[in-house]
Image (tube, rainbow, N blue to C red):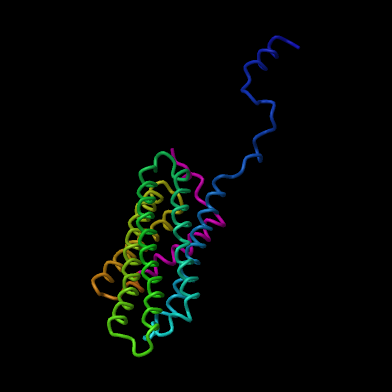
Amino acid sequence: MTYATLAGDHYAPAGSTAKPATGTKPDRRMFHSRLIAALYLTGFLFYGTGTALVSSIVGAPDFLATIAEHRSIIALGAVLMLLPIITDVWRAVVFFPILGNQGRSTALTYFGAQIISVAMFFIGVLSLLLIVPLGEHVMAVPGVIPDWATAFGALLVQSNEYAFQISQIALAFGSLSLWAFGFRVGLIPRAFAAWGLVGYVFLMAGCIAELFGLHIGMWMLIPGALFEIALPVWLLVKGFSPAGYAKE
């Protein structure tokens, strides 16, 4: 063995005798892409299913009269509506390594907005759960449901609606920051990111309009909702752009 060979071995990087790195490290880009996609879809599914269950009960004009027999449905719907607290916050945390050091302020903005959003989810669901003891109290005394109980029940339902609108305003604000950065660095195709930006502007405008009594929010949320359905599909198949992923 020559001196040159010995010197080359001595100055070689540590671990150079290990197996080639190609194919041995997991694809963190696709892992994060698919995790984000799963969190989007599960949060959407949980909240949508829970809302449908609760709305099937409290949507009736005399829902207080039957609330006791539907208590389990209300409870199940409330639990499902609370699960996005986990998926939404987790999603915001996962964006930190995806955005890298260059996007740290964006990640913090998105995380803070998601905290506000899920806090409003919690307040809204708590309002709905309070309908159960209200209904049981009213029905403990047979007879006509008092007007005050009907008004209070309607107030609790409306409280959840207002909490939802505020949560969506926070979500839209954080998402605008996220996808403005995503558009700039090419985290996803720029046309796709632009769709998201337009969708969240519409969502925020629709929610603010609802707070002012203009009932156009359902139509205004459609572009953003479609984006949040299409985005997970894209991430599952293509993932975040390699050029935009973890910008330093």
Q: Nearer the viewer, residue 228 or 116?
A: 116
**Residue at left 37%, top 76%?**
134
- Rendering quarter of residue 136: bottom left
Is residue 123 toward the left or the right of residue 16 in the image? left
- Image: 17 above or below 73: above
Q: Nearer the viewer, residue 210 or 19?
A: 210
**Residue at left 45%, top 69%?**
78
Which image quarter is the C terminus in?
Answer: top left
Q: State the image coordinates of residue 111 (x, y, percent, origin top left).
A: 39, 50
- Rendering quarter of residue 129: bottom left
Report the span colored magenta: 221-248
- Image: 124 above or below 14: below
Q: Nearer the viewer, residue 10 or 40?
A: 40
Which image quarter is the N terminus in?
Answer: top right
Q: State the image coordinates of residue 100 (x, y, percent, origin top left).
A: 44, 41
Is residue 97 toward the left or the right of residue 145 in the image? right
Q: State the image coordinates of residue 28 (x, y, percent, origin top left).
A: 56, 44
- Rendering quarter of residue 113: bottom left
Q: Residue furthest bottom?
A: 143
